Amino acid sequence: MGGSSAVNYMVYMRGNKADYDGWAEQGNPGWSYSEVLPYFKKAENNRDIESLNKYYHAVGGPLNVERFPYVDNNELMMIQGYRELGLPVTDFNGENQYGTDLAQSTSLNGKRMSVNAAYIKPIRHKRPNLKIINEVYVTKLIINKITKTAMGVEYIKQGIPHTAYASKEVIVSSGPANTPKLLMLSGIGPREQLESLGIPVLVDLRVGYNLQDHVTTDALVLALSNKTSTLVDGPQLLNEIYDYYSQPPHKHGPLSSSVTLNAVAFIKTGLADDDLPDIQIHADGRNVEEFYSDPQTYIASNIFPLSFFNGIAFRPLLLVPKSKGFIMLNYTDPVFGPPLIFPRFFTEQIDVEKLVAGMMFVAKLEDTPAFKQSGASFVRTPIQGCEDFIWGTHEYFTCLLTQYTSTIYHPAGTCKMGPSWDSEAVVDARLRVYGIKKLRVIDSSIMPTILRSNLNAPTIMIAEKAADMIKEDWYYC
């Protein structure tokens, strides 16, 4: 329960005002920044100093927003280093996104707050009109082929097929990979692909296209000195885990935080078409020796010591990529096979140039007083696969991007929201699927262009706004 919010980095970030105004300018009425801001505030219970700014923030919503109770010295080093490179301290979700600060998180007292914890748990046994069926696999939408009206879904539970019917409308919220998969399995999607798999076409739409993500690399690594390293051995780690779980509801200590990940910066490379941030910098804790001994395995394992580390991997994220990918059904097993994802990173050279510029900016941190005082320095030993290039050059950083391409999993756009004249649009501004009655999509797949932001908070906003649309369409009619 809770989708990606149950496993994500918990960063609370809304995106730039211009992002939403851009959605509206593309022909999506109701999605300008001034129109979506009330839904961010409706969801928010902000417990930090930002809550004093009543225009941008609110208290009393179901989603708790606060900074983690534990702050590591390396986080402070990073913030100070960014400041010494000229970045102002800012509220990323306020008037100006450009700058640096410790990010807020979707957490409460040092514990994760997923949307399940925020929205579902409080009402799960109190709302008679809410029925949750776990461990099911939805295989298809039930659609009347004559009237082209969504009627329900087919699903499998413990190997037994079932159906569920809707009296008003069907809502698909399966995310930017599985939402297009379900639509295509139901005959809603690109004609050429569906016909090649023998799926009758109900509506020919560009489902699965317009895929965007925040591409980065894992391989720009800073080594910490002994005085700032937080690496611990196995027994110490077990003690930390025991201590965390034995604490009262208000948690503290390293495990109550994602540590260096919270020290965030938004910068401008000067290569964008506008004067807006085009790179967001995140950073993860690393065990430097383990990483360099086998970087591919280390990255593939996806088990990073967020709280205990002797190095930091700086991850500049490309906020508005020109490169776009697509998602297709698995042609070997369309129903049960995972969808085929073609991100097509770096098919536009400008994306490489912006990320290299972001890495050049990060490399300057080493020369700041804050980093010099701590003894931190970038590991200049060329990583496997990039030995032919000199560390710090354009060629070396390009090699890192192409050999160690990564993402922090912000896919969006595969069921694009747009006006009827947009040939790529799948849903309209009220998130209704074109050509099918009583069918709505509510997740990050509807984003026409990806946001300058982590996507959890914006997806919650989309759901809050869609809830009002549903009430307007059905409850008040």
Image (spheres, rainbow, N blue to C red):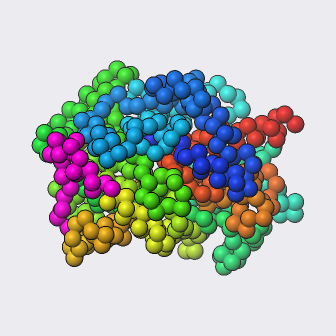
Q: Is residue 17 above or below residue 279?
A: above
As drawn, is 183 to the left or to the right of 246? Answer: right
Is 371 within the magenta? yes
Q: Nearer the viewer, residue 264 or 337?
A: 264
Q: Nearer the viewer, residue 371 or 176?
A: 371
Q: Residue at x 59, y 41 (%)?
A: 460
Does residue 192 show up?
yes
Q: Nearer the viewer, residue 7 or 288?
A: 288
Q: Residue at x 75, y 41 (%)?
A: 469
| Residue 409 percent across, percent down from the top left | 46, 55
Q: Is residue 417 above or below residue 204?
A: above
* Range of residues picked out in magenta: 361-382
As drawn, is 169 to the left or to the right of 310? Answer: right
Q: Nearer the viewer, residue 244 or 272?
A: 272
Name the image quarter holding residue 415: bottom right
Q: Is residue 164 above or below residue 48?
A: below
| Residue 155 percent across, percent down from the top left | 65, 53
Q: Residue at x 71, y 61 (%)?
A: 426
Q: Quadrant of the C terminus?
A: top right
Query: How many numbered marks does the figure carry?
Result: 0
As drawn, is 55 to the left or to the right of 140? Answer: left
| Residue 128 percent across, percent down from the top left | 70, 29
Going by the picture, which residue comes out furthest to the left?
226
| Residue 428 percent across, percent down from the top left | 75, 55
Going by the picture, which residue comes out furthest to the top?
248
Name the image quarter holding residue 70: top left
Does residue 119 show up?
no
Q: Residue at x 76, y 59 (%)?
A: 419
Is 329 within the magenta? no
